[in-house]
Amino acid sequence: MPAKKYIIQLSRDERSELSAVAAKQRGDAQRQRRAKILLRTDQGSEGPAERDAVIATALGMPTRQVERLREHAAEAGPLAALERRPSTRIFQRKLDGRGEAQLIALTRSDPPEGRARWTLQLLADRLVGLEVVERIDDNTVGRVLKKMNSSLI
């Protein structure tokens, strides 16, 4: 078996702080679980230095999750690893200001023939038909209208 690339050696202070988080009766369950994992992976003088597979089995989680936490703790520090990493995902808006203006203009216009009023799906289909967007979900149309306090929603 290859040697571990990410080794966790907790200081006495880090160990006591992680123990306090793990022992709390109330609080964030994810923080508590992470603290328990880090305490079990400690390869310092006071740590049990358990293998990732043993920890994962004991806590009912995938081994890869334990490995990722060990890696994060080795890079950022054990106390920083208790917190969630910020998302790096960038969300592109489906409708920019011009698209939103066209959507509002559509809602103010007469509904299609045979319909008493616009539905979110009809609006989404019309936006695609007018080539405002390549594709859009009716839920997205609803969120945009809600954000703009439209009376349609």
Image: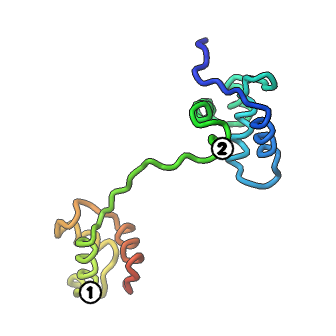
Please name whichever residue, 62 or 71, is drawn nearer the observer in this view of the structure.
Answer: 71
Residue 17 located left or right of residue 73: right
In the image, what residue type sits under mark 2?
A: Leu
Q: Mark 1 points at which residue?
A: 108
Residue visible at 73% across and 30% down in the picture: 10
Q: Measuring from the top left, give residue 54's x and y in whole percent.
A: 71, 26
Q: Quarter-wise, where is residue 102 in the image?
A: bottom left
In the image, what residue type sits under mark 1?
A: Arg
Q: How far apart are marks 2 and 1 (CA)?
A: 50 Å
Residue visible at 34% across and 64% down in the picture: 137
Nearest to viewer (mark 2 / mark 1): 2
Residue 71 located left or right of residue 139: right
Instruction: Say above or below: 134 vs 110.
Output: above
Label 1: element kind: helix
Q: Mark 2 points at which residue?
A: 82
Label 2: element kind: helix
